[in-house]
Image (tube, grey):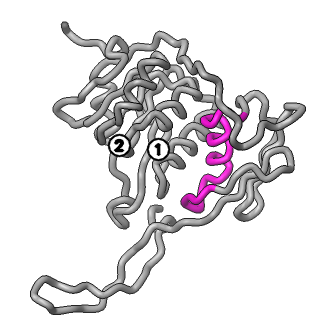
Amino acid sequence: MPERYTTPYPAKRIHSDGTAEDTEVLLARECPVKLFLDGKAFTTLFASPFELKELAVGHLITEGAVSYGEIAGTEVEGDEVHILTQKKSSPPRNETAPAEIYVETNTVFDPEAIFAGTGHLESETYKLTRGTHLAALIDRKGKLAVQIVDIGRHNAVDKAVGTAFLRGLDLSQHYMLSTGRQPAYMVTKAARAGIPLVATKAMPFDSGVKAAKKANMCLVGQLRPEAMLVFAGEWRIKTTR
């Protein structure tokens, strides 16, 4: 139900001829989500007010703070998410991530599986608000496994990754579909989760391309039903020549 992600607000529409009218529009909802790691405040994220457990789990994994196997428990209390780990100590929030992030899998995708993603790029929530992003995980057969909507492209990716880990999905056999641009930071999030390919309807930044090449990932931009642009790791997509 996309309506739960929205809230109605009054506005005044002014036309180019100077006339005006009162109207009501739907805006995307946003809330602060406080994340605690082993009892200590870790960060506050501003996100859509749903899938908070998935957001917390995915954020910790894509930020390199913990691996999924280290998570011992998750509890949601209102707008707070408490994560318990089996680690003896938690890293500081600004700890530098490991220099080398590398996706080991040799997974290859058929072009048809990537083009299938174009059918999942727009959500009903976006149609209502024009103010949300989407992230999805699609398997090698082009089948949709996870689809998440959020106000932020980073949050949507975190929630998709968190959902996948909580469901026990093998991310090495899926690619990430995103409506957002892909700088190095976004590409690295997917790499930390072990995702071999990221596709977006937007264009990547040069930093995103460099990060994808360094991480052994495929990066696709301007995904459309008729064509796509491959900027890195083209060997991960089968072609006729």
Please provide percent x and percent y for residue 21: 24, 91
Please provide percent x and percent y for residue 167: 63, 35
Which residues, given as a range, are shown in magenta?
Answer: 45-65
Is 110 on the left-hand or right-hand side of 35? left
Is 216 on the left-hand or right-hand side of 31? left
Q: Which mark is residue 113?
A: none
Identity of the residue furthest to the top in this view:
241
Against 77, residue 141 (above or below) is above
Residue 175 in view of the camera: yes
Q: Which mark is residue 147?
A: 1
The magenta stretch spans residue 9: no
Between disc 1 and disc 2, whose residue precedes?
2
The magenta stretch spans residue 48: yes
Which residue position is annotated with label 2?
120
- Quarter location, residue 95: top right
Is label 2 in a helix, a strand or a loop? Answer: helix
Residue depicted at 35% across the width and 85% down the height:
11
Residue type, numbered disc 2: His
Please provide percent x and percent y for residue 139: 44, 26
Residue type, numbered disc 1: Gln
Asked if marks 1 and 2 touch (Cβ < 8 Å), the reply is yes
Against 142, residue 125 (above or below) is below
